[in-house]
Image (cartoon, rainbow, N blue to C red):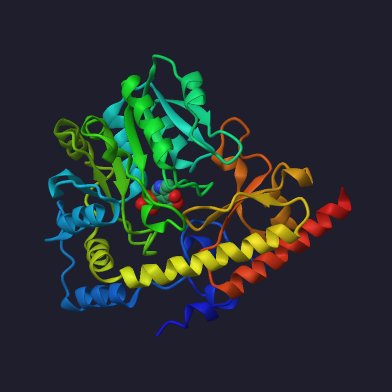
Amino acid sequence: MPKPFNQLVVADMRKVYSDKWCVVEKDELPLSVADMDLPIASEISTALIKHVRDGTLMYSAKQGIPGLKEVVANRLAVRYGWAIGAEQIQPLSATVPGLFLSVSAVTKPGEGVMVQTPVYTPFFEAIEYTGRRIVPVPLSQPGYRVNREALEEGWTPEVKALLVCNPHNPVGRVFTESEIETLANFALEKKLWIISDELHADLVLDGEHRPLANVSSELAQKTVTLYGPTKAFNFAGLKISFAITANRKLSEKMKLRARGSAEAPNTLAQTAALAAYTKADPWLINTLNYLRKNRKRIGEIVAETPDLEWIPPEGTFLAWLDFRKLGLDDPAQNLQELTGLVLERGSRFGKLGEGRGFARLNFGTSQPILDAALDRLQDATAIIRKQV
Ligand SMILES: Cc1ncc(COP(=O)(O)O)c(C=O)c1O
């Protein structure tokens, strides 16, 4: 039986071999890599244990185990009012390979791909490593909003696609209906393909998630959406995702090109996904409430810490903290050196200096661990204020 999540402390997590926890130095406390410290829903572990006990780990079903794609389609219809056929869904080994696959399917080498920055680092990699050109367009201030003028300014005829992150990593925005319409109209007018990474869709804390492809059937023909259970149900280590497009030609192309990069998800990931989507929503509701409490706690600390600012995230479990008033370029480095608190460096998420002075804190953790981290954060900022 895992320990109750709310009682997890740093010493418990040190025994976990995850990317985030197994590399930390003795006294460090990582709130970095974007997965949550909480154990998976018992419905998911039961399904996984049963599958392993049954003893079959043969090649996984390329088009998904029976019912899986139908469950995804049904979920998108019920939660987001987005009606799609199961045949539009391509199961993938993970979302990042899906980013690479879709960028290379809709554009040619040398063409431009727009991204709204700051943004999740693999967006840049998927463009750059496939020989395309990154066209960064900063989200508008205040509040990291979608802005038509900024998009127009960044556009050139060589731009062929727009890569969207919604809900947004790292700033936690959930784009409003009018922002989604702005993106849709812009893309249609400029004849752009859209790749919309909606992996955090089930992690909305305020407001509503609106799938971009659902704006119109015309737009659906030009869009690949990436969606999956691993963030919300916290099994990123198993790896699975879904690429969704109404465009049949593109879908065929992506299936052919998936070979060697974004192939079928493994059997256990498929089993976990089916269990998550059919049985674990009550767990997700509790998790979202827990995350809201953590977000509130961060808000209290930010409010009482001079010169620290943020915009509370509307979705995700990521807080984009603004240390610029403290005069810091790379606050994550200062925090790590001063107190051993490990956050993600803001500079990783920008191309034009948009991440300078910021750090991303992952609050998908227990309250005791979050409190320990926030203590370190306050200690560090107090030391820094004395130094300046
Ligand atoms: C927006 C976004 N897309 C994709 C990923 C990674 O997804 P996967 O583990 O399925 O490759 C992340 C992980 O942080 C993410 O935040």
**x, y percent for residue 45:** 30, 75
Rendered location of residue 270, percent (x, y): 23, 61
Residue at the far bottom: name it: 1
Q: Could you tell me which residue is drawn at 53 percent across and 34 percent down?
A: 139
Q: Position of residue 36 (x, y in %)?
A: 47, 64
Q: Is residue 128 above or below residue 86?
A: above
- Residue 196 image offset from top left, x and y in percent: 35, 39
Total labels drawn:
0
Residue 22 appears anywhere in the view: no
* Residue in the foreground of this view, choosing between 19 and 280: 280
Q: Determine the image quadrant of residue 281.
A: bottom left
Residue ID at (33%, 61%):
238
Q: Dividing the image into 4 quarters, which one contains the N terminus?
A: bottom left
Outermost front residue: 178
226 or 235, which lies in front?
Answer: 226
Q: Let me know if residue 229 appears in the view.
A: yes
Determine the residue positioned at 54% across, 46% down. 171
Most foreground residue, 63 or 313:
313
